[in-house]
Amino acid sequence: MHEAGDTTEYYFNTQTRMVEKGRLSPWEHLLGPYDTFEEASKALETAEKRSDAWDEADADWKGED
């Protein structure tokens, strides 16, 4: 969460695999925004965990084992 007056956002660039402070690249190459550099640097890990959780939820909803 941002502190009062702090509007800095961080993005993970999927093309360069680097964190950007502010939106510097086209949207199609970015994940985010994230509140901190640390969160942005873990963007791929976060996305993978969310995807796995959604896959499990879908399987549960469909009644798959």
Image (tube, rainbow, N blue to C red):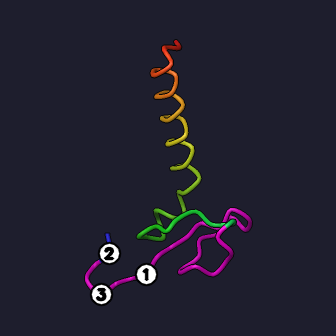
* Residue 59 sits above or below residue 35 on the image: above
The secondary structure type at the circle numbered 1 is loop
Residue at the far front: name it. Answer: 62
Q: Residues within 10 Å of mark 2 (few under 14, many from 20)?
A: few
Q: Is residue 23 magenta?
A: yes
Position of the N terminus by quadrant: bottom left
- Could you tell me the amino acid type at mark 2? His
Q: Distance from label 1 to label 2 (Cα)?
A: 8 Å
Q: Amino acid at mark 1?
A: Thr
**Stretch in magenta:** 3-27
Mark pair 3, 1: CA separation: 9 Å
Query: Which residue is identified by label 2?
Result: 2
Q: Position of residue 28 (x, y in %)?
A: 68, 66
Q: Which residue is mark 1?
A: 8
> Is 19 above or below relative to 31?
below
Q: Are marks 1 and 2 in contact (CB under 8 Å)?
A: yes
For the view shown, which residue lies furthest in the bottom direction?
Answer: 5
Which residue is at 54% across, 57% downward? 43
Which residue carries the number 3 mark? 5
